[in-house]
Image: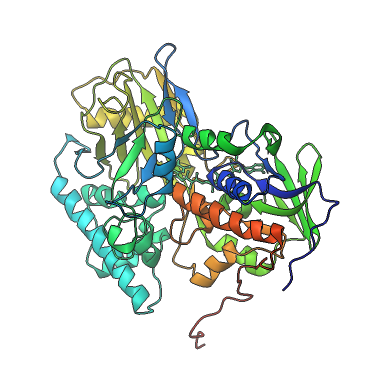
Amino acid sequence: PPPPPSLAKNQTSVLILGGGVSGIIAARTLHEQGIDDFLIIEARDELGGRLRSKQFGAEGRRATVELGANWIQGTQTGNGPTNPILTLAQKHGLKATESDFYNSIVTYDETGPADYLDVFNRAVEAYINLTVAGGARVQRKQVDATCRTGYSIIGAKPKTPEEMVSEYYMDWEYAQTPEQTSWIASSWASARSSANNFTYDADQGGFSDGNLFSVDQRGFKHFIQAEAHTFLSPEQTLLNATVRNIAYSDNGVLVTLADGTSISADYAITTFSLGVLQNDDVLFEPALPTWKQEAIQSMTMGTYTKIFLQFEEKFWFDTQFALYADRERGRYPVWQSLDLQDFLPGSDIVFATVTGDFSERIEAMSDAEVQAELLDVLQTMFPNTTIPTPTAFFFPRWFSDPLYRGSFSNWPSGFVSPHHANVRANVGQRLWFSGEGTSQKYFGFLHGAYFEGLDIGTRVAKCVHAVGACESLPFIEEVSNATPYDI
Ligand SMILES: Cc1cc2nc3c(=O)[nH]c(=O)nc-3n(C[C@H](O)[C@H](O)[C@H](O)COP(=O)(O)OP(=O)(O)OC[C@H]3O[C@@H](n4cnc5c(N)ncnc54)[C@H](O)[C@@H]3O)c2cc1C
């Protein structure tokens, strides 16, 4: 169809809603296509979105830690494809260090230090086998199931606390349990060296299985803020502005902010997290069509919570990672030391990570209650040390934050390809969707947000230029079963 006319009466050409990686890359894409008549609207006081850092620690002993994204996941193999986040990090001189998930690790259980690395290594193998089997299902057009089903079929049935925490290493990737995660999507989503993996497996066109951990004291956000500075002028960004309502029609969009201001545009690209869209933190007028709502509500938002502690002095492990096997699966299982030579030496900072339902549980507790639980776990892990009171304690509440409602999206087993097309598709010609949650290959990742900003930005630029190519993305009005239920 011919592109809709650009209406001179609108205040700007494109509104980019959200100033995270996706929004900034969409803006850069428009700029590169000669379009500078756009405005980024961001609720917070800075750009970066889920790249969010904090000065953490006691007075005089503060260090920058990352509350959100921390790793460049998948870097580059030889001259193969490069993770674009790595490219930007190198361009802007980001300080990052190699992270070794699998070799720099020690293990604990309810008796204290306990070496069950053999159990851990078997779990890593089971995870790879799980994703290889999941990938095979794609080729054979078999239906999806949960990762729990997949694990059971390949014979991995963890029962002891040590087996459960070793398997938990998977939740740590997806921010949800194997019961909540798609078996098929796990084959391309996260596992290293597995079938179809687009991030870690160079044989599949992926980057590499390397991981770089930002220790830059300007914050991991520095790379994207510095990139934004290369092309953005101050009047192209509106900070401290929360979007409440997005009205859309064939003529354009009208975005209303919390302070009542309205801004009109020919096009809008929303980059809000899937969680924000799911929870009606922003309202659409008219309401989004059913096919869109079903898709948004069918993908899930996981929560990944880092809990930071600083002590007077370091008393813990010298590896990067430690696993703690509690009898309750998911109870403070993964610990990371920042007080290491290539990380933040002398910082006396350690942090634990929890995910999914357990994150939601602790968000409902007071800081003091959560701190008491962590100190209890540390006392269990180090029975010969009297655990002192920490000099600083902090954790972010991503799940309850109305700007995020979780940390990153995760693909559940009830979510099928047409749903994915629908999550991504524009609604009418004026309203477009981008962000990590719309990426098929790289959902959950920074590079997912990047590639989506690039692609949707390119599509909208075509619409603005109206060079006969304002093409809608395909959507499926009604997602149905290949084989209807016989009841
Ligand atoms: C704890 C955690 C750990 C992670 N770890 C990694 C990692 O190690 N490696 C990795 O690759 N990825 C990681 N991720 C995922 C990565 O951070 C995201 O995929 C990516 O940052 C998403 O970018 P985005 O532009 O799609 O969304 P966002 O960054 O969420 O950008 C959307 C923007 O919209 C703004 N906004 C929301 N609502 C409104 C409103 N109503 N009005 C105006 N503005 C609004 C938000 O403030 C935000 O700035 C992690 C995420 C979290 C939370």
Q: Which quadrant holds residue 113?
A: top left
At 68% from the left and 41% from the top, the residue drawn is: 41
For residue 20, side relative to residue 237 (left or right): left
Foreground pick, 244 / 114: 244
Q: Is residue 139 positioned above or below 453 on the image?
A: below
Quarter of the image that includes the N terminus: bottom right
Q: Which quadrant holds residue 368?
A: top left
- Residue 47, position in %: x, y? 58, 35
- Residue 111, position in %: x, y? 18, 36
Foreground pick, 20 / 31: 31
For residue 112, side relative to residue 290 (left or right): left
For residue 451, side relative to residue 178 (left or right): right
- Residue 86, position in %: x, y? 39, 43
Foreground pick, 129 / 271: 271
- Residue 138, position in %: x, y? 37, 74
Task: Confirm whether residue 445 shows in the render.
Answer: no
At 30% from the left and 58% from the top, the residue drawn is: 201
Residue furthest right in the image: 9
